[in-house]
Image (spheres, helix red, strand yellow):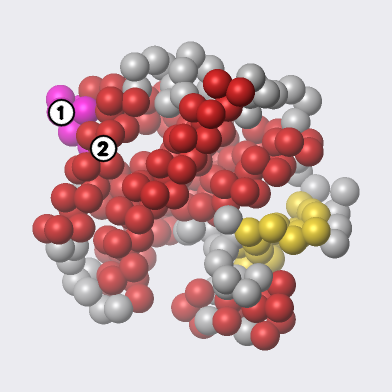
Amino acid sequence: MVLTLYKLDASPPVRAVYMTLDVLGITDVEMVDVNLFTKDHLKDDYLQMNPQHTIPTLKDDDFVIWDSHAICTYLVNKYADSDALYPKDLKQRAIVDQRLHFDSGILFPALRGNVEPVAFRGAKSYTPENLEKVRSAYNFSEKFLTSEWLAGNEFTLADICCLSSISTLNIILPIDEEVYPNLSAWLKRCEAKDFYKKWNQPGLEQLTQLIKTKCE
């Protein structure tokens, strides 16, 4: 196994892959920094590997895959000892897949819409329109959490991938536990996990500091 992960620690999708690797017990990974601010992702060698020039990108020997959800499901399918994170039961897996698409289609766009103007385009604050998208994402998430975890009674990839996004949205618009009690309790359960403290918190703190600096 020769795994190489092209990454930026502050990136929420990268942090989702970090946490998946940790839960799977995969430690033999070469980590390669990709600095978006110096446009490393637009250099020829990176574009040849990933023409979409996104992070994270994973190489497994001669196989290359990008998009955090594709990476996480690939890692589980190939390396997991069980199907707990990504159930083989079609109905259970469909629910996990729906939550992953929810992250791609709702959570991360709400996050990116707020962070990108501040981090890369000189904005000093978030717009009301973009903050409303965060509230909408919280509303959906709150309704999904009818059980302990996002896809039911068991912890799955749905929790890992959505966690990286929701924990970041929480620094943009803090989750009101009175308005979103289920979501707030879920986030606290996740924050207590060792993989969160080791692999999500440091990058989240980096992004928090970056946004604070850009808004000054």
Which residue position is annotated with label 1? 179
Q: Rounded to the nearest whole Å, what is the CA distance between mark 1 and mark 2?
A: 9 Å
Residues marked 1 and 2 touching at CB (< 8 Å): yes
Say what amino acid the circle numbered 2 marks: Tyr
Residue extending farthest front: 90
The reply, left or right, for residue 60 in relation to residue 42 is: right
Q: Nearer the viewer, mark 1 or mark 2?
A: 2
State the residue in front, 28 or 110: 110
165 lies left or right of 22: left
Q: Is residue 65 visible?
A: yes
- As drawn, the residue found furthest toward the left would be 128
Q: Residue at x 48, y 58 (%)?
A: 11
Other residues around mark 2 within 10 Å, as few (<14) / some (14–19) / many (≥20): many
**Relative to 78, 142 lies left or right:** left
Residue receiving disc 2: 138
Total label count? Answer: 2
Please, is residue 89 above or below residue 180 in the view?
A: above
In front of the other: 57 or 118: 57
> Which portion, as a residue range, is magenta?
174-180
In the image, 203 versus 13, the foreground residue is: 13
Mark positioned earlier in the residue sequence (1 or 2):
2
55, 211: nearer the viewer: 55
Amino acid type at mark 1: Val
